Image: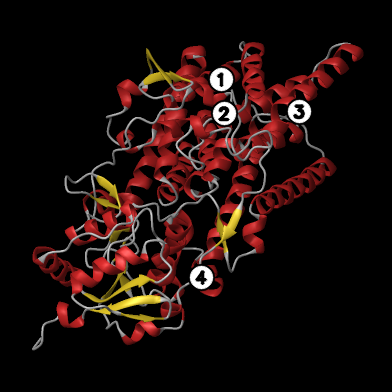
Amino acid sequence: MWAAPSSVVRPDSHVRGRIVDVLVLVGFVAAGVLLYRDLWWHLDSGYLAYAGQDQNMWEWFFAVTAENVLTLSNPLHTDLQNFPLGVNLMANTAMLGFGVPLTPVTVLFGPTVTWTLTLSGGIAATAFAWYWLLSRYIVDGRGAAVLGASVAAFAPPIVSHANAHPNFVVLLVIPLLVHRLVLLARGERPVHHGVILGLLAAFQVFVGEESLLIAAVAMVVFAVVYALSRPAEVAAMVRPMATGVAVGGAVAAVLVAVPLWWQFAGPQSYQGIEHGLNGNDLAAFTAYASNSLAGSEESAVELSMNRTEENAFFGWPLILVLVAVTVALWRVALARAVAVSMFVMAWISMGVLLVVHGEGTSIPGPWMALYDAPLLDAVLESRFALACAPLAGILLAMATQRVLGLRWQAEWRHFAQVSWCGALVVALVPIMPMALPVGARDEVPEFFASGQWQNHVRDGRAVTIVPLPSAGYADPLHWQVDQGLEFRLSEGYFVGPGEDGGGVYGAQRTPTSELLAEVDETGMATTVGEAEREQAVEDLRYWHSDVVALRDDHPNVVPLRATVEQLLGNSGRQQGGMWIWNTTSLTQPSGN
């Protein structure tokens, strides 16, 4: 099954191989830096153009993680957002597995550097991890391994998430998990490798649970297909695999039991999150992604949720090549299992019913039986196509190695190799990623940047920004980070429990925050009566708010200001680029 590339290795070959490994690593690091070059160039003011509010959120996660490490606070919870209830960090994508060890970087250089380093370094490390696995266990040629690893780590779906989602970009643990499973399948030291498997799985829980779940589904599909293909061979693998996986499960359980309890049963936990039906359109697989060389701003608009969820988009030439490779290598059990797994994961990602060019059909998909299964019910089904990237990379590496190793007559061998190289150029050049676009970040208002807020907020109290921070407006998180997390925020951008216990993006809105959000959405002030004023005071007391602040250049500053004036009964004052209303007298009556 997983034969290590070949036989006798001479010392000089070993040295040359190490040199090649270093050069490959340097190449992948360069590719990662080039992908984020504009962000590296503008660390002080750059913001990924299609990150939405996610860059603010992720930088906040890194900053809060560093703060918790330095103060020896609970790393799984914080009340700096959504005060006083706080945020369950384990139930969010806080990426503690990297946030904790990168604390020195965050403290010395700031969370923007941590964010940029995690993304560019993570995608490079993922590519190298796939290269290492491919070159040691699947193909002989390092060139074929580089090709496969490049597709695995830099495929269009991965680059799409590279705009905002490091938990779907930094996937270096996945090939390391596969490596340990390979060793277990070969019967090598099941307890030893099981322990390492458990350590890796536990670490991945703190990096990205959803990507681990998607990888696990792909591995199960692969195992089933391979077992059906080679039942006699698989029979000998069962005992060491079962032993290793059991040991790994026990090790992982010990390490993640408390964090997972906190995630699912601790403060601000929730039960699943409803995304609706979001399967991939079949046409998306043959289209080009927005950030691919052959793509454009409009090429994926009608076939995806947004720029960060272009989860298919391999382009029609690559799809044709993968189909051809599947047919050509069908007799090779490993290739067959990889190919079937790839197509099954693509099928799962299409959702409950097949959709073609926006038109629904009555053809059901596997997701119809899986969408409400425990754990899977929280996954966006279109993301299962992310597993197709490394599976496609493995197939292409195997095919390349086969073509380069042909023993035909010279002229036919040369023709086949040139034809294959031509097919790869046609398939892969159009999906090469371009540097991710970066825009200018809005400056922190002077009221916060200069520390003027300190004259208005007491220790243990909160700032209420208008409109309140949410999934659509997370700039206040950046202002908070800029000030060293020294004040708390009412509401915020995170995932927490809704009224029914299910997950929602942002806090459960109060009547006052709902009213202000409506004013911001409509651009029209609303009539405020005594009931609304009393509710506003009640909500401000609930938030422990000392000051209400509205940016004076907010697009809807006029209706928002008018509404706040009615709610609080005074006109506030302009200071440091903000309209501010001191609420101390309202939230803490005299005598207290």
Discs 2, 4 touching: Cβ within 8 Å: no
Give the mark, 1 or 2, whose residue is nearer the N terminus: 1
Specify how the rendered protein is coloured.
Answer: secondary structure
- Amino acid identity at mark 2: Leu
Residue drawn at x 14%, y 81% is 588
Horizontal relation, residue 419 to residue 519: left or right:
right
Which sits earlier in the primary sequence, circle 3 or circle 2?
2
Q: Nearer the viewer, residue 447 or 252?
A: 447
Q: Amino acid at mark 3?
A: Val
Q: Which comes sooner in the sequence, label 2 or label 4?
A: 2
Residue 267, visible in the rendered structure: no
Give the residue at mark 3.
425
- Dot 2 falls on a residue whose secondary structure is helix
Residue drawn at the location 22% of the way across and 59% of the way down: 526
Identify the residue under disc 2: 391
Q: Amino acid at mark 4?
A: Glu
